[in-house]
Amino acid sequence: MERLVGKRAIVTGAGSGIGRAIAIRLSQEGARVALADLDEEAAGGVASEIAQAGGETLVKKTDVTRAGEMEALVGAVLDEWGGLDVMVNNAGVGVAGTAPTTGEEGYDFVMDVAVRGTFLGMKYAIPAIRDAGGGSVVNMSSVAALVGIPDRAVYSAAKGAVLAITRAAAIDHVEEGVRVNCIAPGTVDTPWIGRITSGYDDPEEARANMQARQPHGRFVSPEEIAAMAAYLASDESASVIGACMVVDGGVTAR
């Protein structure tokens, strides 16, 4: 499908995992995509993949926790393509731990990237999308915002904040033609799983436990999340406003 022909999009955390899949899918649907990541080399690799398929990209090394860099990211897209239609605030990190066992450094890291990063993405992207005549913001929440997930206290808090700010922004900006929604993935098969499970005594057992909590018996694929992002970015979702789109293999149905 080519639902996004003519649209200009930004994807943060685009160098791997869900962000990579979203960037590729948006390009396949016809969008020009700016790939933002702290790992510029990884983002460049994804851009090369997209270019081989005939897509147009822009790569920008970006720390989503720094206001100046997020403002510069949006500015680069405006300079290059004359406007912005879609913002995907995907960048996120996680730490395993309960409230008593999570250190303050881990708390600050997760909250800064997920919550501050999403806030800054909307702060600078929403006016640009409004000025372009309207469009879509897609934020990345999690099923951890909706149900209790063991050993993910701070991650759950961060993703709950993303859900809350999504709904608030949706109401604030709907009359400006800017639709704000979020996606709540289940456990997605990305490099993030390896980083989380590496802290356990038995990483393979931890991975198996994460997979087992999915009622459909497997991890969600990044491409499944990308398909939802493409829908939310497209005009087909014109009446989807302030929604939390769950793609979790049945976790929240229990």
Image (tube, rainbow, N blue to C red):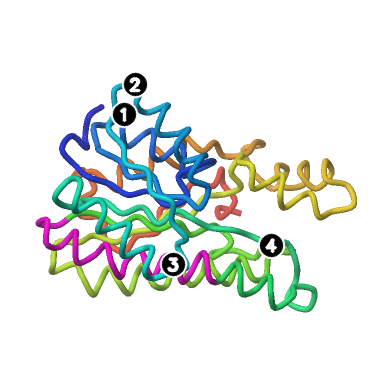
Residue positioned 83% across, 41% down in the render:
204
Q: Secondary structure at mark 2?
A: loop
Q: Residue 122: x percent and y percent?
A: 32, 66
Q: Which residues are magenta?
A: 112-134
Q: CA distance from mark 2 to mark 4?
A: 35 Å
Identify which residue, 148 or 97, lies in the foreground.
97
Residue positioned 36% across, 34% down in the render:
25
In the rendered image, residue 120 lying in the magenta stretch gets the answer yes
Give the number of the disc on residue 28. Answer: 1
Q: CA distance from mark 4 to mark 1?
A: 33 Å
Q: Which residue does the numbered mark 2 point to in the structure image?
A: 53
How packed mark 2 is, by other alpha carbons closer than 10 Å (few <14, some 14-19, many 20 or more), is few
Q: Main secondary structure of the magenta part?
A: helix
Which of label 2 and label 4 is nearer to you? 2
Q: CA distance from mark 1 to mark 2?
A: 8 Å
Residue positioned 36% across, 52% down in the render:
88
Q: Amino acid at mark 4?
A: Val
Identify which residue, 232 or 148, lies in the foreground.
232
**Left or right: residue 232 compared with residue 109:** left
Which label's residue is closer to the chain start, 2 or 4? 2
Which of label 1 and label 2 is nearer to you? 2
Q: Amino acid at mark 2?
A: Ala
Which of label 1 and label 3 is nearer to you? 1
Q: Which residue does the numbered mark 4 point to in the structure image?
A: 95
Q: Secondary structure at mark 3?
A: helix
